Image: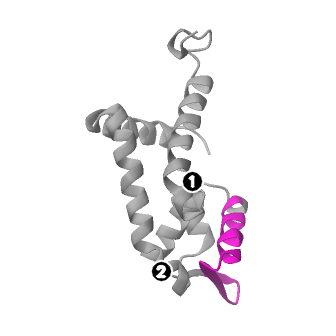
């Protein structure tokens, strides 16, 4: 049975879950050469763009829970790619020299991922889909 003919093809929960799983697989394939999960890679790219970002801001940017971001940061610390510093109650996340070295490879993987799904869906449809997903996400409660 094809997905479009599935019993639940009109259910947003199943349709969005199916899309998320397929996109996740494409993303994992692009990022595995760096030994990073996509969520770790995107967090590191943000920290490279804005060193010293606070975990709460990272959580908002990535639309993840603070506890999830903390786990991602801990994993990146284990890999010696980021370091946290604290000034009183404020924690900041900085890339390490090893993390900075990955910058060009991270950008390359992000480009490859974008090109992969754009080749499948088409650039215009990809852009419309991303715009629609973001608009819908903003309407839904957190």
In reply to whether residue 121 is colored magenta, the answer given is: no
* Number of other residues with Cα within 10 Å of mark 2, as a class: few under 14, some 14 to 19, many 20 or more: some
Label number found at residue 20? none
Q: Residue farthest to the bottom?
A: 87
The residue tagged 2 is 100
In the displayed structure, would residue 8 be above or below residue 116? above
Q: Is residue 133 found left or right of 120 in the rendered image?
A: right
What is the x, y in percent for residue 64?
Answer: 62, 55
Q: Earlier in the sequence, mark 2 or mark 1?
A: 1
**Residue at the image point whose x is 62% and y is 9% from the top:** 7
**Residue at the image point whose x is 52% and y is 86% from the top:** 97
Name the secondary structure under disc 2: helix
Task: Say which of marks 2 and 1 sits in front.
Answer: 2
**Residue at the image point whose x is 53% and y is 78% from the top:** 99
Q: Is residue 114 found left or right of 137 in the rendered image?
A: left
The quadrant of the image that shows the N terminus is top right
**Residue at the image point whose x is 57% and y is 53% from the top:** 63
């Amino acid at each position: 049975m094809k997905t479009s003919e599935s019993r639940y093809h009109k259910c947003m929960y199943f349709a969005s879950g199916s899309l998320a799983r397929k996109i996740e697989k494409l993303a994992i394939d692009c990022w595995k050469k760096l030994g990073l999960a996509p969520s770790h890679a995107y967090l590191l790219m943000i920290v490279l763009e804005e060193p010293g970002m606070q975990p709460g801001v990272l959580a908002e940017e990535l639309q993840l829970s603070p506890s999830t971001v903390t786990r991602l940061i801990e994993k990146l610390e284990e890999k010696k790619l980021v370091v946290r510093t604290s000034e009183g109650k404020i924690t900041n996340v900085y890339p390490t020299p090893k993390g900075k070295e990955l910058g060009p490879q991270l950008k390359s993987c992000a480009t490859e991922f974008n090109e992969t799904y754009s080749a499948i869906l088409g650039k215009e449809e990809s852009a419309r889909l991303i715009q629609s997903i973001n608009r819908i996400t903003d309407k839904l409660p957190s």
